[in-house]
Image (cartoon, rainbow, N blue to C red):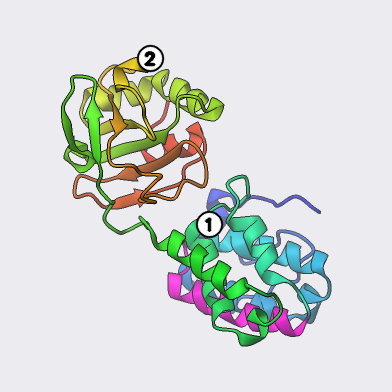
């Protein structure tokens, strides 16, 4: 499959008049539409007007990738994206394309190029609203209902679920009591997880993060989930100013947070509102925190 050409900053600002990412046939946006959100909505809505974009699983996959690249830019309104997904679901079903599998491949897997619950959710909703799609696979409705419940748990823009944590000094408190900075980095980790150690080590070595912590612009709360010991058993080099604590409520047993990838990383403001979630690498974490080296 051909690689996806990334938007340049200029293209994002104007949503290029001559938009071309691949061999996917794309609509010509009317010149009268000058607002980026209008142009994005038009592309997302009309990319599926061309039968060739759904002529085969390969063509549909490439068109979906291009479609998601527009959606991920966050220019179009969420409602426009949801409407476009609903229309696409109907057309793909009639064309015999397993759209749900493709959407999951591109948006719900932690290693997917567009991993984002908010991008996957409209596909789940559209499938649940389509008897034709649901009738194709036994148990699909129940699986999608479960997926939907998981996505809605600690969703971006909602209040983070609180739970009790134990500090190295022996103090137990709600984790939300630690959300005292404009941006709070909540890291749910397991010390036996290789990727967790890699992320924690990379963040602790970041000079820009250390400065943000020192100036109280960012607060780091690293929570050892399913902990059997006190958090003082964990050593994270150069993690000065971090809150290293252990879970005392049972995040996993009580299914308080979905953990599609470890560590599970959230950015939460001082009003306990989730700003970003499921950040999978150092670069995306630092971008979410507005940090530069």
Name which quarter of the figure residue 235 lies in: top left
Return the x and y of residue 148 as percentages of the image width and height: 48, 66
- Residue 81 lies in the magenta-colored region: yes
Residue behind mark 2: 235
- Residue visible at 28% across and 41% down in the picture: 249
Return the x and y of residue 12 as percentages of the image width and height: 53, 57
Return the x and y of residue 108 as percentages of the image width and height: 58, 56
- Residue visible at 80% across and 68% down in the picture: 57
Instruction: Work out which quarter of the rendered image holds the N terminus and state it.
Output: bottom right
- Compare residues 194 and 18 and report the one nearer the observer: 194
Return the x and y of residue 42 as percentages of the image width and height: 56, 76
Q: Residues within 10 Å of mark 2 (few under 14, many from 20)?
A: few
- Compare residues 52 and 200 and report the one nearer the observer: 200
- Residue visible at 42% across and 18% down in the picture: 205
Q: Earlier in the sequence, mark 1 or mark 2?
A: 1
- Residue 9 lies in the magenta-colored region: no
Q: Which mark is residue 227?
A: none
Q: Is residue 114 left or right of residue 66?
A: left
Alpha carbons under labels 1 and 2: distance apart: 42 Å
Q: Which mark is residue 12?
A: 1
Instruction: Work out which quarter of the rendered image holds the C terminus and state it.
Output: top left
Confirm whether residue 15 shows in the render. no
Badge 2 element: loop
Badge 1 element: helix
The secondary structure that most of the magenta stretch takes on is helix
Q: Are marks 1 and 2 in contact (CB under 8 Å)?
A: no
Name which quarter of the figure residue 173 lies in: top left
Q: Residues within 10 Å of mark 1 (few under 14, many from 20)?
A: some
Q: Nearer the viewer, mark 1 or mark 2?
A: 2
The magenta-colored residue range is 74-95
């Amino acid at each position: 499959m051909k690689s996806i050409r990334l938007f340049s900053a200029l293209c994002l600002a104007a949503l290029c008049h001559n938009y071309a990412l691949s061999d996917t046939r794309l609509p010509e946006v009317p010149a009268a539409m000058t607002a980026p959100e209008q142009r994005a909505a038009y592309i997302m809505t009309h990319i599926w007007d061309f039968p060739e974009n759904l002529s085969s699983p390969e063509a549909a996959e490439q068109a979906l990738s291009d479609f998601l690249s527009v959606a991920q830019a966050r220019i179009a309104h969420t409602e426009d994206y949801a409407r476009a997904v609903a229309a696409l679901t109907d057309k793909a079903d009639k064309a015999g394309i397993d759209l749900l599998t493709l959407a999951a491949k591109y948006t719900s897997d932690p290693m997917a190029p567009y991993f984002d619950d908010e991008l996957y959710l409209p596909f789940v909703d559209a499938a649940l609203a389509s008897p034709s799609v649901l009738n194709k696979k036994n148990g699909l409705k129940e699986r999608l209902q479960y997926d939907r419940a998981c996505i809605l748990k600690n969703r971006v823009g909602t209040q983070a679920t609180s739970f009790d944590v134990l500090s190295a000094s022996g103090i137990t408190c709600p984790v939300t009591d630690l959300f005292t900075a404009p941006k709070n980095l909540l890291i749910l980790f397991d010390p036996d997880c290789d990727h967790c150690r890699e992320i924690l080590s990379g963040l602790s070595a970041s000079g820009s993060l250390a400065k943000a912590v020192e100036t109280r612009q960012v607060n780091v709360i690293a929570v050892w989930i399913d902990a059997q010991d006190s958090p003082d058993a964990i050593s994270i080099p150069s993690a000065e100013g971090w809150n290293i604590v252990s879970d005392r409520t049972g995040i996993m047993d009580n299914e308080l947070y979905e953990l599609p990838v470890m560590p599970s990383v959230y950015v939460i403001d001082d009003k306990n509102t989730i700003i970003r979630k499921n950040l999978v690498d150092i670069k995306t974490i630092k971008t979410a925190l507005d940090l530069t080296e």
